[in-house]
Each structure stands twice: as structure tokens, then as C-alpha cells.
Amino acid sequence: MNIIVTGGAGFIGSHLCDELIERGNQVICIDNFSSGDKKNVLHLLGNDNFKLVNHDITRTIEIKWPVDQIYHLASRASPVDYQKYPVETALANSVGTNNMIRLSMVKGAVMLFASSSEAYGEPKSHPQKESYWGNVNPVGIRSCYTESKRFGEALITAYHRKYGIKANIVRIFNTYGPRMRKDDGRVVSNFITSALRDEPLAVNGDGGQTRSFCYISDMVDGLIRVMGSSFTGPKNIGNPHEITILYLAKKIKQMIQSDSEITFNPMPEDDPTKRQPDISKTRRLTGWEPQVGLETGLKKTIEWFKKL
Ligand code: UDP
């Protein structure tokens, strides 16, 4: 198949490009390198099945090749990062999503939109099922991301109702692994980078807030399976193993045998206190289930960061 991956030079996108090529597809990677990095796809550049297009998806694009599928992943995704670029982030998920839907209609391609667990906001229902509507601050510091992901979902659903477009929505939960940017501000990359330098691991709040971390290979497998599934509303992809941020700090410190201290900073505004995916819908419809446990995934990630 001919497959577009927007955000294909990013952390998740580049691993997805690798796997799609490995499975014999032709991949067109569209990225403007705002948070993605050309280094993530350098190894694919000589491959006849890979094309790299430098383009900002908030501008329309014509693609001369046939296209069967579009994975629309392009957006900044780290809270620190998207708060620095709130307008660009909001537009990537709204205008950018509209452009990708239009392109999928022209090409007769099936589309997958990467939404986020952020769509649930500060959840009042736990773990989060897709049927939960969320609890989101529309004007808070995270809303450029959260509300634009929600709008992207609404837009796809509107096109689906009106024109019957073939599109899937995934809600991606926290994901980690090699090729995370060490300076993007997310917790796994921050803690590993600090622990490797014996610098303090700065926990926000008292560290009692929870997240559930999914290893990158499981995420990629989930995305490909959902792309091949029926169009039945949003599907969660994430690892349901929920831990506190303080536990994560201690675990990474212990695995690296670091002398780092653990310090505490004020809790950022609107930082969700808990998050865990209910994956029963995705499992039932696609057979997907995460395979990589936290310890194994962290070990691989730490090894990768050590080589930087
Ligand atoms: N966090 C932290 N220290 C850091 C970075 C993040 O304690 O250096 C916390 C953050 O406040 C949040 C959790 O770790 O509660 C996950 O943050 P991240 O930015 O990785 O992703 P989020 O799930 O918030 O989008």
C-alpha cells in the first residue's frame, strides 16, 4: 500500500514508518520538523519505499502519488512543548486535520487521526473508557492541545456523518521509548536524562499523580491494527499498568543506579491527577494488547539514551 504518515519524523511517527516499510508498504512521510527530527528517519532516506516531504500540514498539499492510507500524527505532543507553541499546535490538529481529511477524500484513502488521552482532561471516571466524555478546561494552558484534539475528533465525525469518510480515531496514552527527544519536557525523557547525569529528578507536585506508560512497539502495533479495523468511534491505545510519577522517579533512579536526588516542584496548572486507559474496546475489536512491561521498556529506553 501507499501510506502517508504526517509527523513521520517524530517519535511515534518514525517508528510507525519503520514498521510500515518493514511490512512491505511505500511510505510518504510528511513533517515540518517543528518537533520531529530528520535524524529519526535518516536511515530510511536511501530506501526506494520511503519519501520524505518537508511540509507544514496547516497548508494544503497535493500529492502526485496514489494514497491508500493516511496516519495523521503531526502535532507537538509534550505539554512543555505545545505550551510554547499553542497556536501552531491548535492549528495542526484543526486546520491540519481538515487538510488531511480533504486529501483522504481526494485520494479515496482511509484515515487515522491520532487523538489523545488528553481528550479526557481531569477524568472523573477511572479508568477511562471511550464512552467517557471527559472533563476539560477549554481555556487552560493545555487547551491548545486538548481542545484541538477534541475538535479533530468532532471534525472527523462530522465528515463521516455527512460524507461517509472512512476514518478511525485513536486516543493515544503516554508512550515512551527510543527517539523521544531528550529536551521535550516529558517525564520519562526528563527523568532518564537527569538520572544519567546524577542531576535531581524534579517531580511535579507530590508525585502522587498517575500515568500509564505504553512502550513504543506496542503503540505502533496498536495503530496499525486500528487502521485495519471498522469505523466505530474512538479507540484507546495505551498500557493499562498505572503507576505514580514518584514510583517512576524511584524506578528510573534505581535502574540507572543514579545518585540523583528526587526533588519536588509545584504542580503545573490542569495537570491530570490520574490516567489509565480501559483497553477492552480496542482489544475486542482488534485483538490488540500491549506486550512490553515497564521494566523491559525502560531498560531499552535507558540503553538508547545512554548512547546519545
Ligand atoms: N512530570 C514531572 N516531572 C517532569 C516532567 C513531568 O513530575 O520533569 C509530571 C507531569 O507533571 C505529569 C506527569 O509527570 O504529572 C506526566 O507528564 P508528561 O509531560 O510526560 O505527560 P502528560 O501525561 O502530562 O501529557
Image (cartoon, helix red, strand yellow):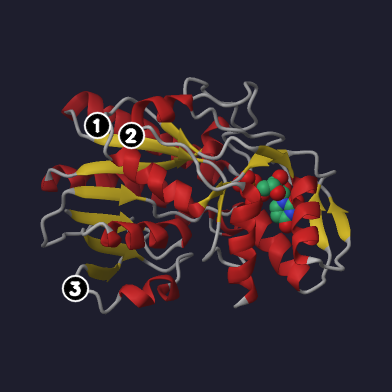
Instruction: Give residue 28's quadrant in the image.
Output: bottom left
Distance between mark 2 and mark 3 Cα atoms: 34 Å
Residue 259 coordinates in the image, percent (x, y) = 87, 68
Residue that mark 3 sits on? 48
Query: Which callout, 2 or 3, points to the residue nearer the camera?
Result: 3
Q: Return the residue nearer the eye: 231 or 32.
A: 231
Q: Residues within 10 Å of mark 1 (few under 14, many from 20)?
A: some
Q: Return the residue nearer the eye: 186 or 42.
A: 42
Image disc number at residue 41: none
Residue 179 coordinates in the image, percent (x, y) = 51, 66
Residue 251 coordinates in the image, percent (x, y) = 76, 53
User: Which amino acid type corresponds to the residue marked 1 in the rendered image?
Assistant: Tyr
Image disc number at residue 159: 1
Image disc number at residue 155: 2
N-term-proximal mark, 3 vs 1: 3
Where disc 2 sits, the SS reads helix
Query: In the shown orientation, is residue 202 left or right of residue 215?
Result: right
**Placement of the C terminus among the 4 image quadrants:** bottom right
Residue lying at 61% horizontally and 33% vertically, measured from the top left = 276
Contact? badges 1 and 2 (CB < 8 Å) = yes
Contact? badges 2 and 3 (CB < 8 Å) = no
N-term-proximal mark, 2 vs 3: 3
Instruction: Give residue 85's quadrant in the image.
Output: bottom right
Where disc 3 sits, the SS reads loop
Q: Return the residue nearer the eye: 144 or 35.
A: 35
User: Which amino acid type corresponds to the residue marked 2 in the rendered image?
Assistant: Leu
Where disc 1 sits, the SS reads helix
Residue 19 coordinates in the image, percent (x, y) = 34, 58
